[in-house]
Amino acid sequence: KTSQFTHINHSNLDVKVLCLLLLTAAAADGQSFHPGRCPRPSVQEDFNVTKYMGTWYEIEKLPAVFERGKCNQATYSPLADGTVKVHNAELLSNGKINSIEGVAKVKNSSQPAILDVSFFKGVPDAPYWVLSTDYHSYSLVYSCSNYFGLFHIDFAWILARTRVLSEQVISELHDELAAAGVNLNRLTVSDQTGCDVMT
């Protein structure tokens, strides 16, 4: 997809036009894009990746173009080299299960709650920041990528160990997201009904 931009003259005007095109595409896909660089919210202290392993179910999220189905879930398992296997799955409207596998790794051992996830070779890793979790019931995850230093696109997920989460916990996690600068009005509730086939 980069070849079409190979011969662009990178004048200020061309860069602005390119950014405008990307912003328009992001808007069409319902992504959450914002001017300026990514915020840097605080993350879970003393994060224990071993306790985090297992399956998490998506409760709420910011729009994500790569998610098209319902019953979204992610399963994490340790790999021998110290990285983490990521298995994401969803149920499509035609009844088929769509899934993808990737690998997550801690960027800096002093900040274990900040991970990078890779799904495709040659494609930049996706940030995965665990803002907070109690490991056994909920997790709050944030992801943000900068583009040209001019704007950023972010994602956020409220996850749970079961397909439902109490309104009180969700409300508390909303407060954390708001403090991180996330627009709560853009959050959507994930459909976790009729998911028996996923098990």
Image (cartoon, rainbow, N blue to C red):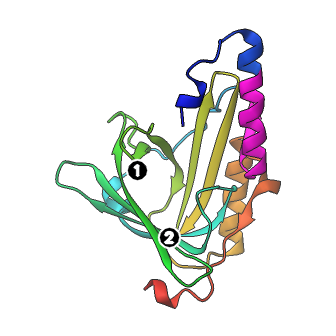
Placement of 20 over or under 156, stated as above or below: above
Q: Secondary structure at mark 1?
A: loop
Magenta stretch contains residue 34: yes
Q: Residue at x 64, y 32 (%)?
A: 38
Q: Earlier in the sequence, mark 2 or mark 1?
A: 2
Magenta segment's dominant SS is helix
- Tags 2 and 1 touching, CB below 8 Å: no
Label 2 vs label 1: CA separation?
Answer: 16 Å
Q: Residue at x 51, y 45 (%)?
A: 129
Q: Can see residue 40?
A: no
| Count of marks placed on residues | 2
The quarter of the displayed image where residue 158 is located = bottom right
Q: Residue 139: where, in percent of width, then height?
A: 53, 60
Q: Amino acid at mark 1?
A: Phe
Q: Amino acid at mark 2?
A: Gln
Q: Which residue is mark 2?
A: 73
Q: Residue at x 73, y 40 (%)?
A: 33
Q: Which residue is mark 1?
A: 119
Report the span colored magenta: 17-35
Quadrant, the C terminus: bottom left
Q: Secondary structure at mark 2?
A: strand
